[in-house]
Amino acid sequence: MALAGARKRTRIRLIAVGAAALTAATVLVGVAFNDAIVFFHPPTELLQKAASGEIAPDRRVRLGGLVAAGSVDNAPDGSVLFTVTDTEADIPVRFDGVLPSLFREGQGVVAEGYFRNGRFEAADVLARHDENYVPKEVAEALRRSGQWKPETGAPPRVE
């Protein structure tokens, strides 16, 4: 009988150690991917995080917002310059490549790249896929600024 009790205690200890190890691993994975889970940062948030040093110039991030009206310019070197806004802050973007067919002023965009020296250097640009899609953070900024009232319909083009 004593042998059965010892085996039971050993089994319970092994289960407890395994559960603790699994919990620790889950916490570590969650901490490691905390910022990687973010779909994108709106301009206001990206500027704040860059100023605080939370986002280093060598860290790849996503910038999301609306393409500011009148900001798209084709540079002589073949790159495209444009501004992404959330109506509270603007970030100039430089992109070397072919823009998606849905890319245009006043529409939603997500750019992936590096924020360096006050400018975003995009490696990839994704245009919004639905005419009613507005990123949550941008919609909140539009509501706060009074430029969009959801009950009136789609958000306005940002100029």
Image (cartoon, grey):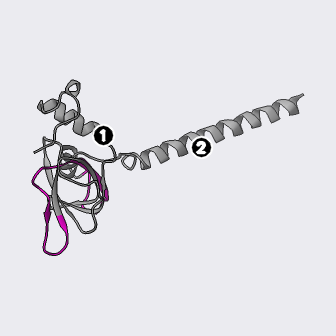
Q: Looking at the image, which is closer to me, 127 or 111?
A: 127
In the image, what residue type sits under mark 2?
A: Ala
Q: Relative to 31, is 56 above or below?
A: below
Q: Position of residue 74 (x, y in %)?
A: 15, 67
- The residue located at (18%, 65%) in the rendering is 80
Q: Looking at the image, which is closer to me, 102 or 34?
A: 102
**Image mark for residue 21:** 2
The quadrant of the image that shows the N terminus is top right
In the image, what residue type sits under mark 1?
A: Tyr
Please tell me how crowded label 2 is: few (under 14), some (14-19), or many (20+) other residues with Cα within 10 Å: few
Please identify the dominant SS of the magenta region: loop
Q: CA distance from mark 1 to mark 2?
A: 42 Å
- The residue located at (18%, 47%) in the rendering is 106
Q: Between tags 1 and 2, which lies in front? A: 1
Is 38 part of what is drawn in magenta? Answer: no
The span picked out in magenta is 54-80
Q: Position of residue 87 (x, y in %)?
A: 13, 41
Please tell me how crowded label 1 is: few (under 14), some (14-19), or many (20+) other residues with Cα within 10 Å: few
The quadrant of the image that shows the C terminus is top left
Q: Dividing the picture into quarters, in which one does residue 153 lie?
A: top left
Q: Position of residue 62 (x, y in %)?
A: 30, 53
**Image mark for residue 133:** 1
Q: Dividing the picture into quarters, in which one does residue 134 lie?
A: top left
Q: Looking at the image, which is closer to me, 151 or 143?
A: 151
- Taking the view exactly as shown, the residue that stands out farthest to the bottom is 77
- Taking the view exactly as shown, the residue that stands out farthest to the top is 151
